[in-house]
Each structure stands twice: as structure tokens, then as C-alpha cells.
């Protein structure tokens, strides 16, 4: 069977590619200011073209086992990501691995820097969120030979190991659900519209469902804020005044959904008779909101985390195991903020 691993780019490869000696490359890696500008430029270009990553472990130990694994997520402030990381840490630590954790705040450029930093410590496996990454990130991962699990999103062919859900399908069926409960005009409320790629996938599913109803899409991009509630609440009445007849909202997360319900209760908007709201993520508080609890979409995050952790461990143990593609599915949870489908 063909092995997944490729020979890692070594310091000697960088030296040959840049036309300088290995000792010059070594000096550049440790003290770049001590190398001539001309040589530094050649070495820097070779590192970029080859996708070379300095192996810090190799510089300290020889023949030692890899002791860490890494997880990089868009945000640890989001309770879904935070709880998933905690579960992965439990799974891998029980097998003797330390878990390196980073969050890039939806910046693929920051993620690239984090991947480079983690690869310098030669982790046994890495888990990343989704298929979208910079070209440099992909090149580094491919050259490193480190097993990679794509989590949260099942899509694309770059990684043979994937655990997650189909976000396009979620967006489509969430919107269809609101129409089926009697909504006539449905909007999509999100935040960081240009950066949150998974919410973007759900938005494209929303667009398909809206088009099938011969309706025009309505997207509301909540300004980035440390407090999603104060940022979201003023937009509800503004949108309902602008978009007369609006009676349904798909929220890109339960934080936005909860803020909409709080504002609706404050302004006397009857939920779900006059306005239905469907969230995403099934946050712990969503079932306990009053006077209307939040209908939402559960993506089985604990299952994603557990499957990811176990797959990382197996890929490290078995060099021929390429990983699996596991779609854990999702479930619409009807609660007080939407009318039931009879």
C-alpha cells in the first residue's frame, strides 16, 4: 500500500536549492542578521518554494518519539469549538500526548503562521477546521508528512481524513424548515460575513432555498463586537422596518439567535407568530431562554471531537492509514422560536 508520508524537506535541500552551504542555512535559521543580504534572499526564497519548516525537535533530540498533537480552530471563545478542543485534549492526553492549541480568529494568514510554528515542533498529528487554507499552509502540511484531520466540515479533496458536517446542506434545510413552518420572507443574520467560511457555506444553502421560493435574499452582517448581543439587537427592528413582511430569520449561530429573541421580547414582537428564529450550534443556554426558547441546529460537536481525536491517534500509529471521511450529520431542534410543522 502506498504510504501517506512524503520525505520531509531537510536543511540540506534548502542549501542545494539556494546554492549556499548547509552551514550558511543553519546560521540563517538561528541568526539571519549574520548572513549576507544576498544569501539571505536566496535562502528565504528556497524556504518559501520548498515549503521547508525548521524541525525544533530534531535540533534537540535524535530518534525521539513525537510527543505532541495540535489543534487549530477559528475561535476558542465560541463554546462549540472550546468544548470540542477540551474533549480532544482529554482523548490524546490519555495516550501520552500534549495538545498544542491555537485559534486564528478567522484569519487564514494567522493560521498559516500557527501551522508553521506548530510544525517546527514536529507534532504527531494536526487537526484543522475546514478545507480553506492558504497555499503556503497546504504546501507546508504536504511537505511535513504530518497526518492532518480536517474537522467541522466535510468538503473538498485536499485531506483524506475529514470529520464534520455539510454546511451547505445545513443552510438549505434550515431555510426550507422556516418556509415549511409558514414563513413567507426569510433573512440570514450573520457576523464577519467575509471571514467565517462555514457560515458562508450555510449562506449559499440559504440562497438556494430562497431562490426556490422566488424570493430575494436578505443578509444582515452584524458588526464585529466583543458582545454579540449588543451588536445584534438594534438590527432587528431596522431590518423589519426595511424589509416589510419579514417573518423568519436564519441565524449563523445561537449567540445571534438569542440576541434576536431578547430584542423581540423587549419590543413586544410575538415569537413565533410574527417572527420565527432558527439558530445554529445548540448552545447550552438556547433551550432555557424565555419567554421563547431558541430552535436551533445541533451538529453533534462532541461526536466530531471524539472522532477527530481518535483518528489523529490512529493515523499516528498506522503509517498506512489515510483516515476516513465521516459526516456526523445534523439535527434541527424545534423549540419555542419556530412554529411546528404539522
Image (cartoon, helix red, strand yellow):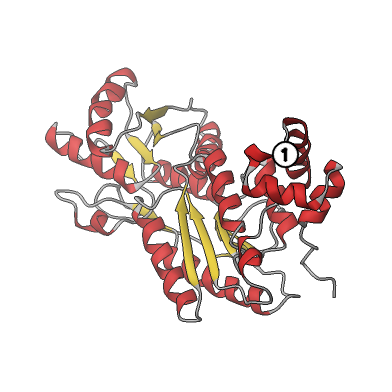
- Residue 317 occupies quadrant: bottom right
Residue for point 19% across, 49% down: 292
Q: How many marks?
A: 1
- Residue 333 occupies quadrant: bottom left
Horizontal and vertical percent for residue 280?
Answer: 38, 50
Horizontal and vertical percent for residue 30?
Answer: 63, 49
- Residue closest to the eye, 199 or 119: 119
Q: Which residue lies under the disc numbered 1?
A: 44
Horizontal and vertical percent for residue 5?
Answer: 77, 66
Q: Residues within 10 Å of mark 1 (few under 14, many from 20)?
A: some
- Residue 245 occupies quadrant: top left
Q: Is residue 41 visible?
A: yes
Compared with residue 277, is residue 94 higher up or lower down, i.e. above or below?
A: below
Compared with residue 124, is residue 283 higher up or lower down, i.e. above or below?
A: above
Horizontal and vertical percent for residue 79?
Answer: 34, 55
Does residue 92 appear to the left or right of 131 in the view shown? left
Helix, strand or loop status at disc 1: helix
Quarter of the image containing the C terminus? Answer: bottom left
Residue for point 80% across, 49% down: 14
Compared with residue 237, is residue 179 higher up or lower down, i.e. above or below?
A: below
Residue for point 43% across, 34% down: 192
Compared with residue 192, is residue 95 higher up or lower down, i.e. above or below?
A: below
Amino acid at each position: 500500500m502506498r504510504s501517506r508520508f512524503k520525505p520531509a524537506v531537510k536543511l540540506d535541500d534548502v542549501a542545494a536549492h539556494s546554492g549556499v552551504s548547509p552551514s550558511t542555512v543553519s546560521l540563517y535559521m538561528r541568526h539571519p542578521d549574520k548572513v549576507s543580504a544576498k544569501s539571505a534572499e536566496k535562502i528565504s526564497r528556497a524556504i518559501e518554494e520548498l515549503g521547508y519548516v525548521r524541525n525544533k525537535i530534531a535540533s534537540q533530540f535524535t530518534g525521539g518519539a513525537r510527543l505532541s498533537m495540535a489543534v487549530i480552530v477559528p475561535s476558542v471563545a465560541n463554546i462549540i469549538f472550546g468544548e470540542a478542543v477540551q474533549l480532544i485534549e482529554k482523548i490524546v492526553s490519555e495516550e501520552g500526548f500534549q495538545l498544542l492549541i491555537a485559534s486564528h480568529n478567522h484569519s487564514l494568514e494567522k493560521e498559516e503562521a500557527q501551522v508553521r510554528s506548530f510544525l517546527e515542533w514536529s507534532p504527531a498529528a494536526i487537526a484543522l477546521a475546514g478545507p480553506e487554507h492558504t497555499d503556503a499552509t497546504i504546501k507546508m502540511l504536504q511537505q511535513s508528512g504530518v497526518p492532518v484531520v480536517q474537522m467541522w466540515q466535510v468538503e473538498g479533496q485536499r485531506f483524506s481524513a475529514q470529520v464534520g458536517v455539510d454546511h451547505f446542506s445545513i443552510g438549505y434545510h434550515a431555510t426550507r424548515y422556516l418556509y415549511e413552518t409558514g414563513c413567507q420572507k426569510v433573512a440570514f443574520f450573520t457576523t464577519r460575513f467575509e471571514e467565517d467560511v462555514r457560515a458562508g457555506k450555510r449562506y449559499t444553502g440559504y440562497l438556494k432555498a430562497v431562490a426556490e421560493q422566488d424570493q430575494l435574499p436578505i443578509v444582515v452582517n452584524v458588526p464585529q463586537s466583543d458582545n454579540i448581543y449588543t451588536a445584534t439587537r438594534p438590527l432587528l427592528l431596522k431590518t423589519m422596518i426595511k424589509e416589510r413582511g419579514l417573518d423568519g430569520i436564519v441565524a449563523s449561530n445561537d449567540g445571534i439567535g438569542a440576541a434576536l429573541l431578547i430584542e423581540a421580547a423587549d419590543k413586544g414582537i410575538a415569537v413565533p407568530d410574527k417572527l420565527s428564529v432558527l439558530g445554529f450550534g445548540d448552545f447550552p443556554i438556547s433551550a432555557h431562554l424565555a419567554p421563547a426558547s431558541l430552535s436551533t441546529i445541533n451538529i453533534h460537536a462532541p461526536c466530531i471531537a471524539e472522532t477527530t481525536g481518535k483518528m489523529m491517534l490512529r493515523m499516528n500509529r498506522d503509517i498506512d492509514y489515510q483516515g476516513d471521511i465521516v459526516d456526523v450529520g445534523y439535527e434541527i431542534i424545534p423549540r419555542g422560536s419556530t412554529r411546528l410543522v404539522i
